[in-house]
Image (cartoon, rainbow, N blue to C red):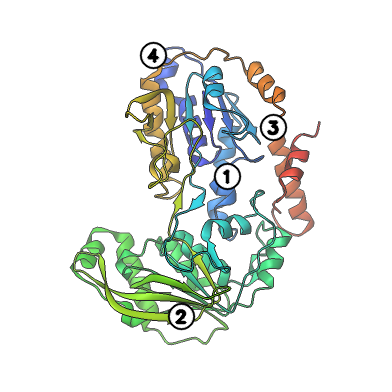
Amino acid sequence: MGIVGAGPAGIYAADLLTKDETLSACGTSVSIDILDKLPAPYGLVRYGVAPDHPRIKQIQGALHKILDKPEITFYGNVEYGVDLKLEDLRRHYDAVVFSTGSDRDRPLDIPGVDLPGSHGAADFVFWYDSHPDVPPSWHVEGTSVAVIGAGNVAVDVARILAKSADDLLDTDITDNVYEGLRAKQITDVHVFARRGIAQCKATPMELRELDKQPGVEVIVYPEDFDMDEGSLRSCEESNQVKTNVKVLQNWAIRDPRGAERRLHLHFLHSPVEILGEDRVTGFRTERMELDGEGGVRGTGEYVDHEVQAVYRAIGYLGSPLADLPFDEERGVVPNTGGRVLDLDENHIDGVYATGWIKRGPVGLIGHTKGDALETVTNLVADRESFTPAAEPDPVAFRSLLEERGVDYTTWEGWQRIEAREEELGAERGRKRLKLRSREEQTSIARQA
């Protein structure tokens, strides 16, 4: 089996395949190669989780145990669509699972979105998580900035923008990220949500973290606290919604603390325009009102906010994959239950998807387990219909990579990277210090 993408979704799928009782009962041995375009595994956990979330990053420990299984082989620095095409994978694997995730920002079609100082959240997240394919420098502009969105990514971006860089020194951030954040002059971060407090998509844990930062005060505005019948139903149906509403209401009624930095949460504000001529100088929103069903409608009242940068966190999209159909609107590979479909909606023999490239960027990392189970269950059920791989020998696959000059890394190479990051961390009094450079990671991984 081949799996493209070494994030949680792909690794969970590999784990399920090694444990599948149906395959074991019929005496079928499973050999799985996991390919990733980056030198290191773990995907979103390594390059999408905020550095001040060590509890979530601990998931790497569980993923490490799976990748350490003898049935699983890891190949890093192998980019699907560049180094290999679908016909290559089908020649070497009986079935292929794509788990490439969502790696780009959903577009926001408003005037001014392309001005300097207008940023997609994905770019900023990849920068502060030291993604090797993102430039090392980032100028954090201004004293007052806007963040558009009400989900966990928006909350993460707002927290990092408001936080003192020194409060990140016990994380794995690289020196360039620390210096970039240390240079910022931000005093006010404004988070704008189009809908009401009962529609806030952030999880309660993420939301509460906003108020646990030294020197940062969270400000919520009572005029944003309309609740309609739809909002009340949401509170009754979901403990998460009920908790979020209670947290926000408590913040709205407390006395100001007078902190040096402020994080403002604005609800019922829809983005209209990013203002400025040569660069961002402001952000215009339309005041919204609840429609009675949990939705919103415009009021025709516009508000201008003086900001020097705007960060758009309105959702991620997956990227198209060579030789496969793609749903541009949803940013996913068309599929049913993980079975990838062609343009006529027929299952493409032996081709599957799991994770965000299958269902879109919805849910937490743990939700990919159930998602992988559905895909693997269908894959195993289809196994009798697979066209067998013409060259299943692992030696033949490695020979192909070497013939094409692919400077691939291995699981043993990743363990050398991991050991070096721990050494660097110990030198700085930290648990770990991440290596940013792809070249440095690859060099360490390929040491004899």
In the rendered structure, which disc, 1 or 4, sits on the residue that comes first in sequence?
A: 1
Residue behind mark 2? 305
Residue 384, numbered label: 4
Q: CA distance from mark 2 to mark 3?
A: 49 Å
Tag 3: residue type?
A: Tyr
Q: Which residue bears the numbered disc 3?
A: 408
Q: Judge left or right: residue 144 versus residue 437.
A: left
Query: Disc 1 designates what residue?
Result: 60
The quarter of the image holding the C terminus is: top right
Q: Is residue 58 visible?
A: no
The residue under the point 37% across, 20% down is 382
**Residue type highlighted by circle 4:** Glu
Task: Tell me the crowding category of disc 2: few under 14, some 14 to 19, or many 20 or more residues within 10 angstroms, Cα based.
Answer: some
Q: Give the number of callouts.
A: 4
Q: Which label lies toward us, 2 or 3?
A: 2
Does dot 1 land on a helix, a strand or a loop? helix
Dot 4 crowding, Cα within 10 Å, few <14, some 14–19, many 20+: few
Q: Say what amino acid the circle numbered 2 marks.
A: His
